[in-house]
Image: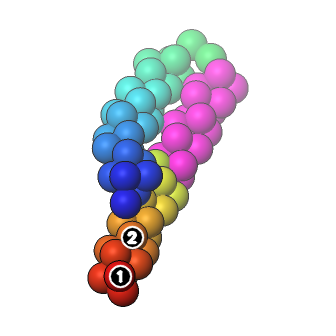
Amino acid sequence: MVFGITLILITPLLFFNANQKDKEAEIIRQTNEVRADVRKSNANFNRTIAFIMLAGGTLSIIFGLHTRRKM
């Protein structure tokens, strides 16, 4: 359960980083299209990892509660 809670607590930081990189990509796009695409891709990767960690944390908490309930 602690692992799941930790994953869920880290998730907002990843979403924040992804949003910052999206904003940076829009600024960079004015001067360099390729660099902006790389930044946007990095933001999408961070967002994907955040969703995976959120789902994993939720499943970990559910599994921990289920295991504790059996005891």
Q: Nearer the viewer, residue 50 or 71?
A: 71
Q: Nearer the viewer, residue 26 or 55?
A: 55
Please give the name of the residue rendered at 44% of the width and 21% of the height, measured from the top-left corner: 24
**Cβ–Cβ below 8 Å for labels 1 and 2?**
no
Question: Label 2's element?
Answer: helix
Which of the numbered marks, if any, corresponds to residue 35? none
Q: Amino acid at mark 2?
A: Gly
Q: Position of residue 29 (x, y in %)?
A: 53, 23
User: What's the CA distance linking mark 1 and mark 2?
Assistant: 11 Å
Which of the numbered marks, if any, corresponds to residue 64? 2
Which SS type dominates the magenta stretch? helix
Please give the name of the residue rendered at 36% of the width and 66% of the height, measured from the top-left corner: 61
Quarter in which the C terminus is drawn: bottom left
Residue bearing mark 1: 71
Which quarter of the picture shows residue 19? top left
Q: Nearer the viewer, residue 42 or 27?
A: 42
Q: Amino acid at mark 1?
A: Met
In the image, is residue 43 above or below residue 68? above
Q: Position of residue 12 (x, y in %)?
A: 32, 41
Residue range of the region highlighted in magenta in the rendering? 33-49
Q: Is residue 52 left or right of residue 20?
A: right
Disc with the residue nearer the chain's start (1 vs 2): 2
In this view of the protein, can residue 37 be seen by the observer? yes
